[in-house]
Image (spheres, helix red, strand yellow):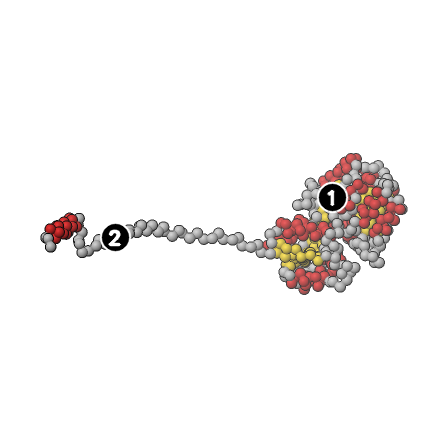
Amino acid sequence: MTRKPLFWLIIVIVFSVFFLVACGGTATQPVEEEAPTEAPAEEEAPPEEEVPAEEEAPAEEEFVFGMVLVGPQNDRGWSQAHFEGGEYVEENVDGARMIVFESLNPADKPEATLEGVADEMVADGAQLIFTTSDEFEEDTVGVAEKYPDVVFINISGDDALTGEAPSNEGNIMGRMEDMKAIAGCAAALATDSGDLGYLGPLINFETRRLAASAYLGARYCYENYRGMDPNDLGFTVTWIGFWFNIPGVTLDPTEVTNSFLDSGADVILSGIDTTEGIDVSGQRAAQGETIWAVPYDFEGACDNAPDICLGVPYFNWGPSYLDTVQAVQSGTWEQSWDWNGPYWEDLTDNTQTHVGWVPGPALTGDMASNLDEFIAGLASGEINVWTGPINLQDGTEYIAEGATATDEEIWYLPQLLEGMEGPSE
């Protein structure tokens, strides 16, 4: 064996060792891999200051009020005007909720009583209840005594005035007498026959004074704008026996209206809750008769027969109902007897007037001009149709010549007036 290969093998080994040492390594220990360097952790942002969630506005506290109607809420008359007054409250008072009981009368709901209705409304949370008819006047006193923590308002009554009402009951009525005088004036301006028919409900102080106001307005305008003798003006009142037709109980207002027209009346003034006066007159006019009508109670009543409608005197309950609800809600309500008048600056401003007058499409230019003059005179006080001499139907002097009737004399009118045809009792 030669030594040459061994020699070269030794040289290769020595050179490899020398090379590894020169490079800083060792022949026996492998170089450890450095652990990968972690990216420096991002500096944690300081916690944001906790912003409290926006506080929710406290829910409006519910205010429940009851509305007891003698007729249906859509009668286009008395009851609908009250119902819409309640809706006006709901629109203007946050959280207000109206409970309605309609047609509380012996014909529609003979088993229902005001006490039973009030029981249910109070159980449902009512803090205020409007009883919207003089039919409910006596019973309102009883339920107000039963629920002394609830406020009761009877419409058209006078128990708060006479002292018969408990302290939690008040009365509200619109001063419709002024608007009825306007209605009578419009009728007198339109009539050709000189005969007016007045469709009356039942007989009491309210209905007598409203019919009498229409008569006095008619006499004034017949004399002062037509140049006619007011004693020649016919004015007949027929009472049907209730606020609206009850078959078999009342006179039928359709038949009464036809009777007026058959007897020569050419203007029908309504004093009942419903629309038969203008409806029948409109039907007769459509057959070619020259007839006019003045409906009652509800602002939109002319729509039933606009071509013959001279205008409508209407109740607007929204403002007084709103004032009452806000007073009860705030704890400032006090018992009162309120006979609320018109807003003379604008008789159709339903944010302010308690009673109003809508001129009808059937008014001619001359009629409208005279009527506007009459209304302006009422507004200024220059004209007061309740200025004497005024005699009662039996001839008794009621208001002396030159004197003006007091509110009490108007409110408690004991008879119809001299010159009016129809029973006073």
Task: Answer above or below: position of 95 versus 146.
Answer: above
- Relative to 75, 48 lies left or right: left
* Residue 97 in picture, x, y percent from top left: 63, 55
Task: Give the label, 1 or 2, closer to the camera.
Answer: 2
Q: Amino acid at mark 1?
A: Trp
> Who is closer to the viewer here, 115 or 182?
115
Q: Quadrant of the N terminus?
A: bottom left
* Residue 358 in picture, x, y percent from top left: 74, 42
Judging by the rendered image, the residue that carries numbered circle 2 is: 34
Q: Residue at x 78, y 51 (%)?
A: 274
Q: Residue at x 84, y 37 (%)?
A: 227
State the CA–CA distance, disc 1 to disc 2. 101 Å
* Residue 379 in picture, x, y percent from top left: 72, 41
Instruction: Pick whichever of labels 1 and 2 is earlier in the sequence.
Output: 2
Q: Amino acid at mark 2?
A: Glu
Judging by the rendered image, the residue that carries numbered circle 1 is: 357
Query: Residue furthest toward the front?
Result: 1
Under circle 1, the secondary element is strand
Dot 1, crowdedness within 10 Å: few (<14), some or many (≥20)? Answer: many
